[in-house]
Image: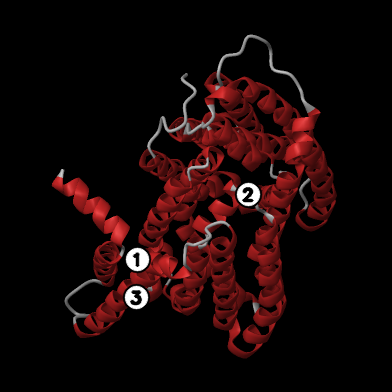
Amino acid sequence: MKFKFGGSNIWHNVISNLAGNGWLALMQIILVPVFIRLLGIKAYGLFGFYLALQAMAQMFDLGLGTTLNRELAHYSAQAERSGEVRDFVRTFEFASWIVAVLAGVTILLAATFFVTRWTQTDQISVTAIRPVVFCFGALVTMQLLIRFYQGGLSGLQRQPLMNLIQIIMVTLRDGGSIVVLRWVRPTITAFFLWQTGALLIYVVAIRMVLWWSLPAAERPARLHPGLLRSKSRFAAGLSGITLLALILTQIDKVILSRLLSLDTYGYYILATTAATGLTLLTISLFIAIFPHFSALVATGDDVSLRASYHFNSQLMSLMVMPAAGMVSLFAFDLLLLWTGNIESSKNAAPVLSVYVMGTAMNSLMLIPFAVQLAHGWTSIALRISLVQLLVFVPSIIFLSRGYGPVGAAFAWVMSSGINMIATIFLTHARLLKGEPCTRFVRDIGLPALAVLTMTLIWRQMTSEISGFLHPVAAALALFVTASAAVVLAADGLRSSIFSRLRN
């Protein structure tokens, strides 16, 4: 494979990321009910516990995958340094394997402790679960390795290939599990053994593809501990950011589980789960542009970086704002379409209408955050995340006591707003000097005003034509018209689309 940055268009990367993440989400939506029916809810609870352990294991990543992503983007933009790239990958791969194995052992010990608690409550024998517990450790180890190799392929701009592998392997993993449970052995042990085997194949396949994608060399790749030391500060900063992000996204669940009744807490979880679906779009764009920004920083092409920064800020507005406006206005109807439960939808809708705004704000700061990471500047994101956490925790306690789960959602919006404003201001002040923040207001302020206007118009219209237009159809109409309004309000998007139409 040819080692060249830019071999894949950013649009191709975004579309492939959407396809890969979308297929993963679709498989979960379709197959989870099937897993529950074949295994039983008690046994499937073990899978839910594994997912929680997998989320916790993110703190063990130590930023190695993202560091590899950034550095390979740098290397690929500087052909004269291509001889160093294989040594770099070999060194970081060695460190990643050590970290992943240690994380797997830690998770194994934690899961072993859990088994004792499980057998006391649900009468499942330790003998039957012991193989599953060992699978927990192996699965976490392989998930971390997959994240590392995905970071490498992303940095090489091989994201379409990366997502093709993901689609194939996720289908093999989850589709094969159905085959095993349906026609081989319907046990939780068989389920996890298949999952483990499928992920092992995934690790082998994605590792081979990464090494095939690297430039040829006259000598074998060698370990260079000095490379780890030189990037340790950046990796440590990423690890801290990941840890704080994990706390920020989970601390509200912990606090509210204490403050809210069980049913009210369930409605909050339903709303926040629905809102996080918005991140499927934003992460796909972030994964595509981060190595692009890194390559521009490596070559010192500041003009192209600034132009790409503004265009992708407007593109993020297009991907986030119309969807957020639609979800906020039609929260009840969309929840009812998803869950089929009127009571749950009615109670979760007010929370979702507010919470999705905070999620949108966090998405809008991903573009300046990508600029920070491309420059290797992690300290400011750490500080901002810490301030956000210090604001979020007391505000969620205070507001939830007075206003219930909707108050907690407002706390999320407030802390997210602080995060977005601080990230934009400090990025412009240090990394985009001479680029006024008012320019970013044009990137997100005018599109936001356009979406707000369309949302208010449709709010008035739906109250007048409620008997003539189905709410879901009205929601889709709002999304389409709001998207058109964003394109007209964003000068970069407007010029690009009109130019393509003329050509």
417 displayed left or right of 498: right
Q: Which residue lies under the disc numbered 1? A: 322
Crowd rating for badge 1 (residues with CA inside 10 Å; few <14, some 14–19, many 20+) = many
Callouts 3 and 1 close, C-beta under 8 Å: no
The single residue placed furthest to the left in the displayed view is: 502
Tag in front: 2 or 3:
3
As measured in the structure, the alpha-carbon distance from the residue carrying label 1 to the one carrying label 2 is 36 Å
Q: Secondary structure at mark 3?
A: helix
11 displayed left or right of 353: left
Residue type, numbered disc 1: Pro
Tag in front: 3 or 1:
3
Q: Earlier in the sequence, mark 3 or mark 1?
A: 1
Tag in front: 1 or 2:
1
Query: Which one is in front, 233 or 353?
Result: 233
Give residue 412's position: percent from left, percent from top. Answer: 58, 74
Q: Earlier in the sequence, mark 1 or mark 2?
A: 2
Q: Secondary structure at mark 2?
A: helix
Callouts 2 and 3 close, C-beta under 8 Å: no
332 displayed left or right of 131: left
Query: Which one is in front, 412 or 468?
Result: 412
Residue at 19%, 73% (x, y): give it: 469
Callouts 1 and 2 close, C-beta under 8 Å: no
Q: Earlier in the sequence, mark 2 or mark 3?
A: 2
Q: Which mark is residue 449?
A: 3
The single residue placed furthest to the front in the displayed view is: 434
Q: Which mark is residue 44?
A: 2
Give residue 32's position: percent from left, percent from top. Answer: 52, 49
